[in-house]
Amino acid sequence: MTGVVVVRGLSTRYGSTPVLRGIDFALSGGEIVGLLGRNGSGKTTLLRTLLGLARSDAGRVEWAGTGMGVPPETVDHFGGAHTLPPQVRANTWVRLVSRGDAVCDDRRPVRALSRGSRQLLGLRAVLARTGLDAVFLDEPWEGLDPDGGRWLTETLRRKREEGCAFLVSSHRLHDLAALCDRYAFLHDGSLDVRPAADIASGRVRGADLLRAFDRVES
Amino acid sequence: MTRLSPFRYFAAVTPPAAPLVAVLAILAAATFVLESLGPGSSDWVLASIALVQTFACSSGFTRQASRGYYDPVLLGGGTRVRIALAHFGISALPGLAAWTAAGIAGTIAGTSLSTPAFRPAGWVALLLVSAIPWAANLRLPPFAAGSLWLLATATLFLSGKLFRALTLLHSDPAWGRSHPWSAVALGLGFPAAVPSLALPAPVLAALVALSFAALVGGVVTVACATYPLSEEGA
């Protein structure tokens, strides 16, 4: 396997409960992989373990550029509105996280913003960065209004064309269905990765995805 | 691609608590006023700065990191060692600034660099109250290590042990040389008093070694820890 990140035999557990069991996976440049799974199935744990932010008990994660389990600086992540520090000012956050590639006029602290505005702020800061190789997003559509959702979908498409890879965890199946090249179903600690072409058919791709998801779960 | 500076990140995202910075600024200004009234009259202010510094450096890391607040800097391309040192630097900076200001005030008033803040014992005290609370508080809520240290000092003082050692050291400056471990314990128990105590060089060296050991331990803690989101129950 080759790619921006390659994972072999990744396993982790919380106490005695296994969360990830021997996961093999590779994310290639210029593709969007949708990460699906029930609540508590370990999607966030998988994202953070790949990024080196959470511990793994076994297996290897190799990032292109470093050759180690530590991602290069061309990789970024947004874990959701709740991961924004509440006291930091919106304009400061955007300037810092985007490395100066974006500006924001809003000087209010993050805690003064609505949940949807915080979500959009965090996404804009990360996705404004240029030269990114990979971005991991955890429930990115959560809290966004329709305009924000459309902006996100279009931005992901545009950055994919620029060669950026995305691993996107979401329950919003319709949004994922409009975007993803592959789907990774996380169930009982195992990852089942399928090409989108194998799943989508007809016009209502989200519904097909839901049926595929249920098949994997059963 | 511009690398995210950990120092700038922590300065913007988790700066030292504003009330503590305000108190340190007031104390620094007070040294200039007191020293202008009479050289050496502001020595007690150093003890106050040291006390506030124990709280300023009890900033904590793991809790914020486990909420995802430090994700950008942890993924920013810098080494974890650099991140840890930047976090320590930001935590210690206000106290260092106040300490330096107090030293400058003392130097101007006394027309000598041999002011308590700038003597070796002064720098040792500052290092002690910066490094140990920072390292001890990494996994704790903010201000926990400072509170525990203050509680331990108060308990020792009320028990009479600290007072007895202080009296012995003041009455016999050679006491520290003949009882080095007791002198080290005195420095740890009452770090705010270290600048005004006649502690021998080996004792000061031991306190520096302890401070650096704490600092290294803290850096290793940050470097080796992982940060699953706390909402996952980890």
Image (cartoon, helix red, strand yellow):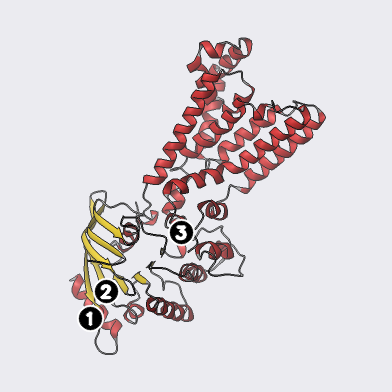
Image label count: 3
Contact flag, marks 1 and 2 (Cβ < 8 Å): yes
* Chain letter of the residue carrying label 1: A
Q: What element carries label 3?
A: helix
In the image: residue A29, left or right of residue B179: left
**Does the image show residue A49?**
yes
- In the rendered image, residue B220, in percent from the top left (x then y), is placed at 40, 41
**Neighbourhood count class around disc 2 (C-alpha, 10 Å): few under 14, some 14–19, many 20 upward:** many
Closest to the camera, between mark 3 and mark 2, is 3
Q: Quadrant of residue B26?
A: top right
* Chain letter of the residue carrying label 2: A
In the image: residue B183, left or right of residue A6: right
Instruction: Choose between A9 and B145: the one closer to the eye.
Output: A9
Residue shown at 54% from the left, 70% from the top: A102
User: Residue farthest to the bottom?
Assistant: A203
Closest to the camera, between mark 1 and mark 3, is 3
Q: Which mark is residue B64?
A: none
Residue under circle 2?
Answer: A183
Same chain for the residues at labels 1 and 2, yes or no?
yes
Residue shown at 66% from the left, 36% from the top: B100
Residue under circle 3?
Answer: B72
Residue under circle 1?
Answer: A199
**Neighbourhood count class around disc 1 (C-alpha, 10 Å): few under 14, some 14–19, many 20 upward:** some
